[in-house]
Amino acid sequence: MGRTVQTFRDMVEREEERWHNFRRTLRPLDRSMLDAIFDSARAHADAGTMIVTPRPIEVVLISALIDLLGTVRHLEERLTELEKRTERCGKENDGDD
């Protein structure tokens, strides 16, 4: 019988367990952010499966960075949209005098 290869999801779970004591000492808000980092890795499990690394924490952190950058990009787009609306609203009000 051949050896069973550990799945990426299993590696993420093992890595998360390795950080258990660290997590336990964090404040609740920080704890939820650490959980979100590992959630990012699980969300990118298909991509994580494609890289073979002895350090799964690299994939965990890259996954979290991808999610973080996506959030920043979304917020930048939303800010630009709101700035344009505010500018248009200001121009419309300038003509009311």
Image (cartoon, rainbow, N blue to C red):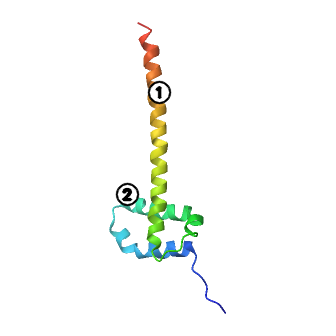
Left/right placement of residue 59 relative to residue 31 reads right
The foreground one among 56 and 90 is 56
Q: Which residue was labeled with disc 2?
A: 29
Q: Disc 2 residue type? A: Leu
**Above/below status of 84 relative to 92:** below
Residue 60 location in percent, x, y? 47, 66
- Look at the image and tell me in which quarter the N terminus lies: bottom right
Q: Do tag 2 and tag 1 residues touch (Cβ < 8 Å)?
A: no
Residue at point 45%, 57% (across, down)? 65
Write down the residue under mark 1. Answer: 84
The location of residue 90, given as percent across then percent down, is 42, 18
Where disc 2 sits, the SS reads: helix
Which SS class for mark 1?
A: helix
Q: Residues within 10 Å of mark 2 (few under 14, many from 20)?
A: few
Q: Residue at x 57, y 80 (%)?
A: 6
Q: Quadrant of residue 43?
A: bottom right
